[in-house]
Amino acid sequence: MDYKKAYYTLFNEITDTINYLNEDSFQPRGDRLRVARNMLMLAQSRTELLVISQPSEEDEVREETPGETAPLT
């Protein structure tokens, strides 16, 4: 399973959340924390979806060379 896309997605969304928290804003602190929490929860959900939508190693079809047979299970 290739985790690169999930890693980059999560990393970038965490970075976006940190940048949001570092911005000067007139929003009350509690509101900003709620928005940041929601941003992180969304990042978690998106990353989880990327991971579970990838085929597992067991699901991948084994390529056979000519004349080779797959083991019986």
Image (cartoon, rainbow, N blue to C red):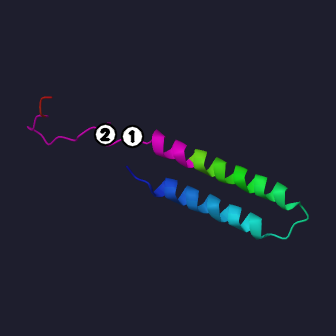
Most distant residue in the left direction: 67
Most distant residue in the top direction: 73
Left or right relative to 73: residue 26:
right
Q: Label 1's element?
A: loop
Give the total of numbered labels.
2
Q: State the residue at coordinates (53%, 42%).
A: 49
Q: State the residue at coordinates (77%, 52%).
A: 34
Name the one closer to the observer, 25 or 8.
Answer: 25
Amino acid type of disc 1? Pro
Number of residues whose C-alpha sits closer than 10 Å to that of mark 1, classed few (under 14), some (14–19) or many (20 or more): few
Q: State the residue at coordinates (55%, 49%).
A: 47
Q: Say which quadrant the C terminus sits in.
A: top left
**Residue 72 in the image, given as x and y percentages of width and height:** 12, 29
Q: Label 2's element?
A: loop
Amino acid type of disc 2? Glu
Marks 2/1 in contact by CB < 8 Å: the verdict is yes
Q: Which residues are magenta?
A: 47-70
Q: State the residue at coordinates (69%, 66%).
A: 18
**Residue 46 in the image, given as x and y percentages of width and height:** 59, 46
Q: CA distance from mark 2 to mark 1?
A: 7 Å
Give the residue number, with chain letter if any, for mark 1: 55
Q: Is residue 67 above or below residue 41?
A: above
What's the mark number on residue 60?
Answer: 2
Name the one closer to the observer, 52 or 33.
Answer: 33
